[in-house]
Image (tube, rainbow, N blue to C red):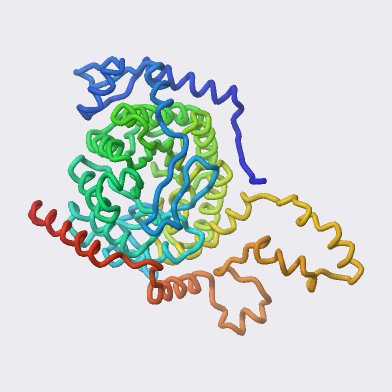
């Protein structure tokens, strides 16, 4: 039986739900995109043109929640890495879009297209990472083309599921066009969604023009989309965890409503990437213990509404891969996984509040993800695992090392991290006293150098994708 942490009772979830409905009805949400305004008004919301605030009745939200699917599939290019949302699985994804990279030499610098390729290779190769997110954002290509490089290189270097792009209608439609080349057309892409979109509300209580344009485009194209508020407790939301959960819930629910009004049945994902403000510095604290509580409460709310979910974990404010990074990353990742999110983002590679991606930490976090997955899998209480007869036989012999039962189970019952040391000091010293960071960098370098994708991208598809990028580049004059 799997393990789950749920700090809120049903009555407490209903209190948060009731408070959320009051916020939506009485305070409302600022909506800066015209089509979303039109959709909400037609469905019964009251919109003030001067303030651009939509006050939204509870009945509208309840009806839209009924339309959101409880289960759906996000597809990888090859098929064997598809993610099934709403089935009780907990998947892990990489850090998303840091603009800086800590290289194999330990030096932090602006991310490049070469880093994008390398991180995709790592994500594809590392077994405990389920989703190849945009582990860094390239700064050596035109900003207006970077999203296309991300998608193209993702399909080229990974068979796992990928992120999409949701900022502005034009660029969002370009991301859909590019993925449609791989899928065989837009209708085929709609039947087999291959892009995971992100349409972040702006806290407090605002739907921006650009993100909402992207949200609507993805809804109509049948691509699943997450709506993750980035509330900063005490800054852009109430300082209390409960107050943050209420505001965040309102931002997520109105986003789901817009998606469902644009396309009934659009795959929608309840999301959060909220954190605490450190009042000493004014900085976000994504590695804080309270983030685990936010993730737990938000995951419960997702299940309360019957909506698949995406949380965050594995974050740290540390500037390097050190003790702080390990403690904060393990703490937030384990809490998010125990909370039962369908997918946990930032689970691998994040330092500096996810502003920097680290090669070494990507490798180390793969092992942390493996440990976390082992913990949440729980304890098997089958007759085979209870091993009563095995105990009777092996105890008489004085040990279990040679028991067939041990041979059947030791590989699956015990997770063995590839990066962490287990052994004597004498053996460690004889092997060169290598620390865990050095080992991780060496492993990352080897994967980047030697990894070969299991199913290379079809040459004709590759050509059509690169031709498409050239056409966009020419059209935009970059």
**Residue found at x 41% / y 51%:** 353
Instruction: Using the image, determine if residue 9 lies above or below residue 477.
Output: above
Residue 107 in which image quadrant: bottom left
Q: Residue at the bottom extreme?
A: 430
- Nearest the camera: 450 or 328? 450
Which corner quadrant holds the C terminus?
bottom left
Give the number of marks.
Answer: 0
Q: Position of residue 347 (x, y in %)?
A: 47, 53
Point 21% across, 62% down: residue: 140
Q: Where is residue 249 shown, x and y percent of the image?
A: 43, 29
Q: Do we see residue 327 in this rendering?
A: yes
Q: Is residue 279 visible?
A: no
Task: From the top left corner, tell me how far across and down residue 267 is, in percent.
Answer: 38, 37
Q: Is residue 412 above or below residue 50?
A: below
Coordinates of residue 243 in the picture (x, y in percent): 47, 27
Q: Is residue 107 above or below residue 381?
A: below
Report whether 274 appears left or right of 407. Answer: left
Residue plotted at (64% across, 71% down): 422
Q: Is residue 411 left or right of residue 139?
A: right
Write the residue at 31% across / 49% down: 164
């Amino acid at each position: 039986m799997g393990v789950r942490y749920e700090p809120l009772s049903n009555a407490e979830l209903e209190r948060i739900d009731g408070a959320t409905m009051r916020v939506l009805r009485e305070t409302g949400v600022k909506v800066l995109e015209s089509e979303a305004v039109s959709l909400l008004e037609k469905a019964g919301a009251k919109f003030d043109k001067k303030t651009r605030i939509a006050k939204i009745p509870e009945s509208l939200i309840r009806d839209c929640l009924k339309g959101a699917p409880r289960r759906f599939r996000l597809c990888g290019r090859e098929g064997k890495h598809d993610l099934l949302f709403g089935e009780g699985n907990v998947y892990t994804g990489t850090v998303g879009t840091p603009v800086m990279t800590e290289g194999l030499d330990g030096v932090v610098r602006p991310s490049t297209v070469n880093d994008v390729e390398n991180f995709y290779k790592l994500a594809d190769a590392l077994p405990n990472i389920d989703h190849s997110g945009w582990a860094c954002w390239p700064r050596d290509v035109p900003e207006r083309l970077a999203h296309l490089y991300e998608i193209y290189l993702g399909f080229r270097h990974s068979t796992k599921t990928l992120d999409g792009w949701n900022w502005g209608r034009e660029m969002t439609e370009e991301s859909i066009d590019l993925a449609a080349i791989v899928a065989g057309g837009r209708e085929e892409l709609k039947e087999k969604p291959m892009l995971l979109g992100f349409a972040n509300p702006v806290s407090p209580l605002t739907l921006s023009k650009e993100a909402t344009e992207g949200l609507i485009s993805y809804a109509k194209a049948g691509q699943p989309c997450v709506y993750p508020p980035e509330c900063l407790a005490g800054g852009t939301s109430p300082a209390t965890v409960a107050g943050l959960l209420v505001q965040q819930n309102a931002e997520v629910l109105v986003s789901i409503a817009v998606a469902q009004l644009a396309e009934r049945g659009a795959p929608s994902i309840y999301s959060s990437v909220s954190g605490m403000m450190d009042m000493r510095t004014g900085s976000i604290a994504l590695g804080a213990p309270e983030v685990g509580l936010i993730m737990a409460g938000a995951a419960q709310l997702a299940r309360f509404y019957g909506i698949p979910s995406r949380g965050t974990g594995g974050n740290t404010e540390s500037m390097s891969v050190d003790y702080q990074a390990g403690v904060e990353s393990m703490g937030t990742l384990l809490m998010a996984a125990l909370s039962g999110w369908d997918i946990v983002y930032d689970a691998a590679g994040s330092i500096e509040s996810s502003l920097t991606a680290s090669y070494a930490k990507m490798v180390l976090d793969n092992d942390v993800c493996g440990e976390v997955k082992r913990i949440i899998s729980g304890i098997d209480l089958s007759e085979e695992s209870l091993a009563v007869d095995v105990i009777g036989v092996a105890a008489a012999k004085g040990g279990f090392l040679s028991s067939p039962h041990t041979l059947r189970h030791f590989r699956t019952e015990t997770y063995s991290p590839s990066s962490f040391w287990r052994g004597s000091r004498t053996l460690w010293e004889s092997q060169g006293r290598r620390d865990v960071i050095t080992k991780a960098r060496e492993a990352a370098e080897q994967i980047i150098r030697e990894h070969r994708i299991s199913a290379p991208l079809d040459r004709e598809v590759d050509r059509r994708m690169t031709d498409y990028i050239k056409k966009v580049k020419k059209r935009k004059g970059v």
